[in-house]
Amino acid sequence: MLREHASAPTIKLQKRLAEAGLGSRRAMEELIQAGEVSVNGRIARLGLRVGAADRIVVSGRALDTRRPAGPQRQARVLLYHKPEGEIVSRSDPEGRPSVFDRLAVFKRDRWLAIGRLDFNTCGLLVFTDSGELANRLSHPRFQARRDYAVRIVGELGAEQIRRLRTGIELEDGKARFDLVEPQGGEGTNRWYRVRVREGRNRLVRRMFAALGVTVSRLMRTVFGPFELPPRLKRGQWLRLEPAEVKQALIQLDRAAAGGDAGAAPPAPASRLRSQGEARRLRRVAAREFVRAKPVARPGTTLSLPAPLAVPARPKSRAGLRKANARRAPRRFSAGPASPEADRAAATAPRRRRRWLPSK
């Protein structure tokens, strides 16, 4: 019999599983409907609410209740620059390369790919171990921002741009771009920046195809609060720091509250610099600091320290001998000096070094 907790806080079962990093809420709902989840020894039903004391088993494995869930657990995020020729799936009957092959170092954890990219599309792909974050970015009601760089054959006319912005009727409903900006190009190839707020399959390519325009390359640059760092090359991944993830969650909260969700997020490219480049930048900054001249405020007098007095080098032989005579004798001792050694050193003839002018 399932436990009823009148006072203890409870949440829906699919949300608890998503927060544990097992998958998105939609995937967890399908798992529950398939009968793969049991609570306290009984097969769970969709919509069941669970608490902290309930024992949850998923596909024969008990859920680790020691791992915090919800707001108490900090989500982890990976940014991956997906190249063309990789699928966003853990298994493929055709044996094609998968993006999860690049995450071999993180195979012990359960990473979720948010917002799939098709086989011929490159760009930003976000991974997380938080089902709650995955749901907030992928669910249609949140309308997460997605920016793409599109290269087409030819150039768009004013009427075509207007249709892309107002909406084009597709087989699965009407779709539109929030933004269409020309980005230049050479010859017959032209680049455009577009923005959508839904993740239907091959949406960008189908919208251009409805106008009779061929897309030769498609790259995602922004997804929600995450932006593709300029220094992140194809096939490379970057793990965000907890402070960067926290800032991204704050931006998501602002967007949900009606804030400005279109502002470009900061790219975490500073940590991609190598140690050698960081040292070089510090040296350059130090040189610029030394070369910087102090500036006096208006109405004040700038006082600079007097320059160090550097004695001029004697030019004649007599001057060199006098300068050599004024030099203090060098004394070296392997141990503490004795009075006898001091007297012997004082009466010994002083050996002077002769200075000769350079030729």
Image (cartoon, rainbow, N blue to C red):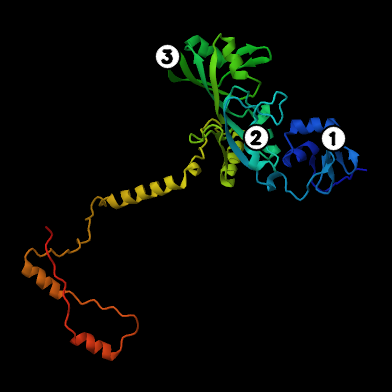
Q: Amino acid at mark 2?
A: Asp
Q: Amino acid at mark 1?
A: Glu
Q: Nearer the viewer, mark 1 or mark 3?
A: 3
Residue at point 62%, 40% (across, down): 77
Q: Which residue is mark 1?
A: 36
- Which disc, if any, is residue 101? 2
Tell me which numbered mark, 2 or 1, is placed earlier along the sequence: 1
How far from the left and from the top, in percent, is residue 78? Answer: 60, 39
Disc 3: CA contacts within 10 A as few (<14), some (14-19) or many (>=20): few
Residue reaching furthest to the bottom: 340
How far from the left and from the top, in percent, is residue 119? Answer: 62, 23
Inter-mark Cα distance, 3 to 2: 37 Å
Tell me which numbered mark, 1 or 3, is placed earlier along the sequence: 1
Between residues 86 and 36, which one lies in front from this camera angle?
A: 86
The quadrant of the rendering that contains the C terminus is bottom left
Inter-mark Cα distance, 1 to 3: 56 Å
Q: Quadrant of residue 173?
A: top right
How far from the left and from the top, in percent, is residue 220? Answer: 56, 27
Q: Nearer the viewer, mark 3 or mark 2?
A: 2
Residue 305 against residue 263 in the figure, above or below: below
Residue reaching furthest to the right: 1
Q: Quadrant of residue 174?
A: top right
Q: Which residue is mark 3?
A: 187
Tell me which numbered mark, 3 or 2, is placed earlier along the sequence: 2
Q: How many marks?
A: 3
Residue at point 58%, 11% (across, down): 209
